[in-house]
Structures are given as structure tokens and as C-alpha cells.
Amino acid sequence: MRVLLTNDDGIYARGLLALSEVFSKKGECLIVAPELEQSAVGHAITLSRPLMVRRARRNGRFYGYAVSGTPADSVKIGLKEIAGGPVDLVVSGINLGANVGINVIYSGTVSAATEGCILGVPSMAVSLDSRSDEADFSTAAAIAGRIAGFIMENRSLLSGIALNVNVPALPERDIRGIRFTRQGQARLVETFERRLDPRNNIYYWLVGETLQPEDEEDDTDLSVLKEGYVSVTPVESDMTRHDLLAALQNRDCPVL
């Protein structure tokens, strides 16, 4: 199996290293990731400047390719230029912090996986439900390795679909199982902290926390994650509300 690994936390993030340790045992492992952190850039791609790519080293040895762009950029250039041949799977992560609810739209981690699917390669995004700098990614990486096998066995069913995987920050023995879920409505409730720099110029930091609606049902990504299960949500790039399309087409719309 030939796997392209990427992320949005930057090429030297510990979550990406944990994935490489698992997937390098399964086959050829190619790392193509942003040179710097690109959290919450969504599906942005770089059009107004060239993409710089450099060979990155870790502990004195070649590790992967660092791209001066976004996660989607990394997948594009990785599959089209760097890989030099077919890739069986794209894995994005492991993100530090869950990607659930409305926040999936902002996620560079998830967007890297959907980019892989757009380019015809089975893909998944993997996130750990922790914000701790000391987070242990080993369990999430092991689970990602097993889900990769499921994806390969179900390629035809999952054509054009990325799996958004969120793993509880628990020892594997305490994880209750894996459940397929739908994207919920949890969202980042944000505020802006107003500050002054040393020259009295005003600047702002966006801060907030992900909150779940009180009436959200128990089959959503965050609900399942809170119960100690791994949440696996199939997502795609087509954002059309197909269930409303026919009804809208039967209504008169004012002509401009």
C-alpha cells in the first residue's frame, strides 16, 4: 500500500509523526505537509504565489516534503508532482483537537482529505479530542491504521467520500468502539480579545470553545465522541441540499 500523509499542524507536528510510525509498517509512506501550521484554513489553495517545496529532515534523516502552502495545496502537489505514481490512500492528521460539527467546514485537516477524494484517491482525516501539548497520539494512529484497512476493502462503496475520524483522548482499552455518525451542529462560540501592542496599536485574538446545542441528537459526531466512541463521519465535497432541490425548482424565483 502506498500512502500519502499530510496535516494542517505543520510537517513537524507530533500527530503526523505518529501516523508515519504506523503507516510506514504497512507500505510506502510519503509525507507532504505544510511547512508551517495551517489550522482553520479550510479548503484554501494558493493561486497568487508559487509553492515552494523543500526536503525536510527529522533527527538527521530525510522525513518528507515541506510545502509553503495549505493542506489542500500539499495534497494536490503531492499527488500530481511528488508521488511520481499512483497513491492508494491519503491520510490527514492527526489533528490536535476534534474536528466535529460546523467546525468541519473550517478544518484544514478535513479539507486535505476531501481534496484527496476530489483527485480520486480514498482518503480520511484523523483528529484527537485533546488540546493538551502532552497528548498521546499512539492510540489514534493505531485506530487510523485499522480504519485504513476498512477503506481499502470498501473502495467502491466509498468512492468520492472521505472519512472524518475523531478519536477520544482515552487509552485504547477505555474506548467503547467505533460508530458511524452524521455531522452535528456543534460550533465554535467565539469572542475577540482586544489588546494593545507596545506602540498602542489595537489588535485582536479570536478565542472560543466548541459548544453543542442542548437539543442535539445522540447520533452526531460530537455526541458519540463524548460517550467514548470513535466517531467516523462520511463527508464529501458536494454541498448541495439534494432533498430541497426539487422543491426549489418548482417555486418561482424573482427575475433580476
Image (cartoon, rainbow, N blue to C red):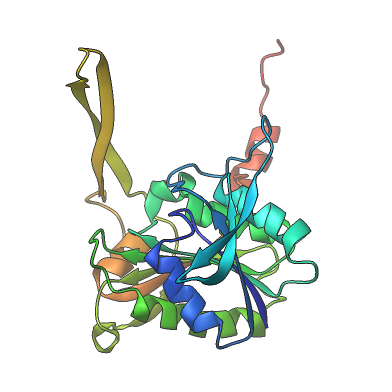
Residue 16 shown left or right of residue 241 in the figure: left
Task: In this rendered view, identify the residue nearer to me: 64 or 154.
Answer: 64
**Which residue is farthest right?**
85
Q: Is residue 167 left or right of residue 46?
A: left
Residue 35 lies, with reference to residue 134, above or below; the image says above
Q: Looking at the figure, which quarter contains the N terminus?
A: bottom right
Q: Is residue 41 above or below residue 59?
A: above
Query: Total of numbered circles in the picture?
Result: 0
In this view, the residue farthest toward the front is: 60
Looking at this view, is 5 or 155 the one in front? 5
Locate residue 199: give its quadrant: top left
At 31% across and 68% down in the image, what residue appears?
A: 225
Q: Is residue 171 visible to the viewer in this orientation of the structure?
A: yes
Give the image location of residue 216, x and y in percent. Answer: 29, 54
- Please name the residue shown 42% across and 47% down the image: 39
Q: Position of residue 30 (x, y in %)?
A: 63, 71
Residue 18 image offset from top left, x and y in percent: 42, 75
- Residue 220 shows in this picture: no
Q: Residue at x 55, y 67 (%)?
A: 124
Nearest the viewer among 61 and 234 is 61
On the image, the x and y values in percent for residue 139 come to 35, 81
Q: Quadrant of the C terminus?
A: top right
Would you identify the image quadrant in which residue 153 lies?
Answer: bottom right
**Which residue occupies 43% across, 44% down?**
40
